[in-house]
Amino acid sequence: MSWNGIAQNLAVETSQLIGVYKGSDNIGEFHRSIMNLKKPIEGPAPSKPSKTIAVKPVEPPVTITPEIKPTGLVTPKILEFEAPVDPNEQATRYQLYLQELGILKQENERLNKELLSRDANISMLETVLASVKREKEKYENSYYVYMDKLDKVRTALEKNTPARAIIEWIENGGEE
């Protein structure tokens, strides 16, 4: 049952509403049972009220005197300003702020230059690292070539190949 269905049946006692709801097999039967429980309005139907306008007497305005203050209202606080500041002191502070700003700008420029220098160093180191990596790969490749040749020499020695033939093979670049 929806809240709207319950709200329309608030004229019926709660216990009767629940009993009818439990005893109904469908929503139509429930509505018919509720209608039977609601008390019919006795007497003639109420007529529309007449359209006469009643004039209210004008009430005198309420004046608030200092003795009569409504409770719960907050009175605004009057802002009190600090003592006037000496213009010479303001000028001195302004000059100090300008000096500090100049110092901060110089520090900012120095740090930017330092960052650019570090970036340049990083780029140079990355270039050197790439070069070293290529050289390492070259040496690794030659290492594997020599290891392969040594394995072939060992295999040839195990097969009792004459040493002169092995030396000639090496002198020719180890090509088969």
Image (cartoon, rainbow, N blue to C red):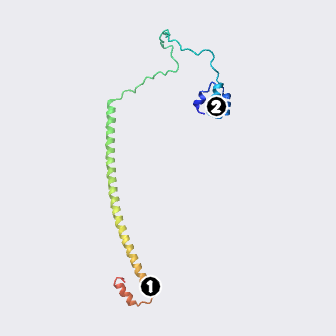
Q: Position of residue 96 (x, y in %)?
A: 33, 38
Marked residue nearer the N-terminal end (2 or 1): 2
Q: Amino acid at mark 1?
A: Thr
Local packing at callout 1 (Cα closer than 10 Å; few below 14, some 14-19, many 20+) is few
Q: Position of residue 40 (x, y in %)?
A: 63, 20
The dot on residue 155 is 1
Residue plotted at (61% across, 31% down): 28
Instruction: Answer left or right for 107 relative to 12.
Output: left
Residue plotted at (63% across, 26% down): 35
Q: Secondary structure at mark 2?
A: helix
**In this view of the protein, which residue sits in the foreground, 42 or 112?**
42
**In this view of the protein, which residue sits in the foreground, 110 or 13?**
13
Residue 93 in view = yes
Q: Secondary structure at mark 1?
A: helix
The residue beneath circle 2 is 29
Instruction: Answer left or right for 11 relative to 113.
Output: right
